Amino acid sequence: MSRPSRFRRPELVHQLAAALRREITRPWTLMEICGGQTHAILRHGLDQLLPDQLELIHGPGCPVCITAEAAIDRAQELAGRPEVILCSYGDMLRVPGSSARTLLEVRAAGGDVRIVTSPSDVLAIAQAHPARTVVFFAVGFETTAPATALLAHQALALGLGNLSLLVCHGRVPPAMEAILAAPECRVQGFLAAGHVCTVMGEEEYRPIAQRHGVPIVVTGFEPLDLLDGLLQGVRQLERGECRVINAYPRASQAAGNGAARALMERVFTPVDQHWRGLGVLSGSGLQLRPPYDVLDAERRFGATIPWSAAGNGIAPGEPASPCISGRVLQGLARPTDCPAFGGRCTPERPLGAPMVSAEGACAAYHRYRA
Ligand code: SF4
């Protein structure tokens, strides 16, 4: 029998859960921003150990889930071109675009769509196929953006003329701002994603905590990390505090990773971006800045992704669907509130992105609570 990780030791898990029950005196609502944390909470049954007064709302921190249908449509359109090899991470191939079609189906119809595990795979493919045009559909938050930035840097340094980037990276702080500014918002504090803060540090979170009067706790992904993050969040709420606290010091430092941040700043500039479920969020995306913008697939192929300016979470042309992923991604509904959950929508036949991704809330509920 394998021994549990020291961050999962049952006696310590129960001690922290008991401490939470002792300290809480009123109802509080916290959001874990990251889909990886949502999965860990459900997988380890932590939600069932919490005091009744503590409500957890699941956040939009799943890169596959928040990628706009318009971006997926654009990737599909590029993948259908005979000269193009389109590369992306595995989950992106299963997410439906506006016509319910997926990149997997584009591949089945003859498109050259390849799964990669890192941008270095894309570099190797571009070098191996100089006569083809290789497009990297780059998604993910600040955790994966530095590797995309490195790919852009290498492509220019090597003079790779056949590589383009369809950049759909998201930045977490603008999404937190949007959630807090929504009229229906019930979030009173956040568990911030430890791996994002490992790259970006805590700087961007302090003004959010101060402006909105919410505690933000940088939190890891193991049961003890998550319970400690919740305890530190509840303690602050009980005391009326709204500070940024690092409960993940073994991986995350206040300043983040200086080299990764510098590379990102050199290659990207923030841009408004459409998030599925949240609409267009100011400064929530990343765009290639000169001289790296010569790699921009939209520029090279002569079109732009038609982001909706309506800010209602519905991309232009998005069909009517029972999917309430917009409300799920804003923390306004649970996956089990969706009429399609577990019936018309399953991981095998997903109607919406949160059922596709390994970090999606609907997939987590289907796996651990259905
Ligand atoms: S269960 Fe499926 S249809 Fe319902 S919100 Fe989740 S992804 Fe959308």
Image (cartoon, rainbow, N blue to C red):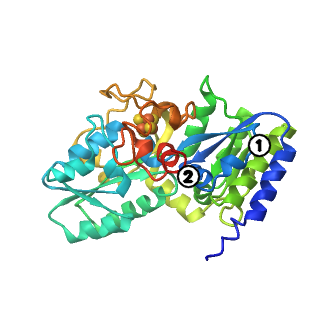
Mark 1 sits on what residue?
A: 51
- Left or right: residue 265 compared with residue 104: right
Location of residue 269 with respect to 10 vertically, above or below? above
Residue 136: % across, % down: 31, 56
Q: For residue 333, what is the image quadrant?
A: top right
* Residue 234 locus on image (x, y percent): 79, 43
**Which image quadrant for residue 291?**
bottom left
Q: Looking at the picture, does residue 354 appear above or below residue 151?
A: above
Vertical side of 362 occupied by 157: above or below: below
Nearer to me, 48 or 139: 48
Residue 247 makes an appearance in the image? yes
Q: Position of residue 99 (x, y in %)?
A: 26, 35
**Mark identifier at residue 39:** 2
Tell me the quadrant of ligand 1: top left
Q: Residue at (36%, 36%) from the top-left corner?
A: 344
Q: What whole-number distance in Å separates the C-alpha atoms at marks 1 and 2?
A: 19 Å
Q: Earlier in the sequence, mark 1 or mark 2?
A: 2
Q: Can residue 89 be seen in this view?
A: no
Residue 197 in the figure: left or right of residue 92: right
